[in-house]
Structures are given as structure tokens and as C-alpha cells.
Image: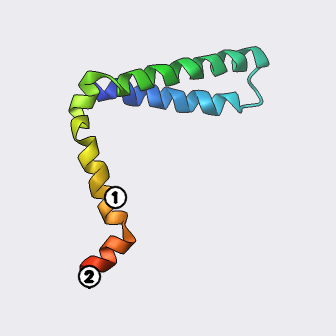
Amino acid sequence: MDLKEITDLITIRQYVVNSTGNPSIDRKTVNYMNGMLLMLDKKIVELLQSDTFKEYMNYQDVGKAIQEVAKLNDIKSGIRHKL
């Protein structure tokens, strides 16, 4: 799993977002950067949804993790356990 590629793309994405708001950059370049932003998002999502990344993150256990968080945040359940 190459996390550096993902983090590098996220860094580039942040630069592109910041650049699109820069008034010293001409409109044509800003339009290009807006298009590039879409492509960066698409690539980042593609990498995050890859089987390799899912395996790295143990994504098969996501249901279990959601249940654990729900238990931790269930106020009524927490009160019952303390009584």
C-alpha cells in the first residue's frame, strides 16, 4: 500500500483549492485548476476504494466498528449500564 501517493495527491488537492481562490491567477488557469480538482478527487476516491487500501484499513470490520461507536454514543444504553 502506497500511502505516500494518497497523501501527495491530498497535498496537491489542497494547493489547487487554495490557488483557485488566488486573485493573482488568471481566469483561464483557475478554470483549468477547477477541472484538475475534479480529477484529483476522482483519483483519491479511486485509491481509497481500492481493494489494497480496504485490506490495509481492515475495511471488512467496518460493520463491527460502527456498532462499537453506536454503543459508545448511546446515552440511554450508557445510563442503563451504570444503574
Q: Is residue 57 visible?
A: no
Tally of numbered discs: 2
Q: Residue at x 31, y 74 (%)?
A: 78
- Toward the bottom, the furthest residue is 83
Q: Which mark is residue 57?
A: none
Q: Is residue 30 left or right of residue 54?
A: right
**Secondary element type, mark 1:** helix
Tell me whether the residue at label 1 lies in contact with that at label 2, contact meaning CB atoms closer than 8 angstroms: no
Give the residue drawn at x 29%, y 78%: 80
Residue under circle 1? 70
Q: Nearer the viewer, residue 60 or 46?
A: 60
Amino acid type of disc 1? Ala
Please report whichever mark, 1 or 2, sits nearer to the chain's N-terminal start.
Answer: 1
Is 14 rendered above or below residue 42? below
**Residue at numbered disc 2:** 82
Q: CA distance from mark 1 to mark 2?
A: 17 Å
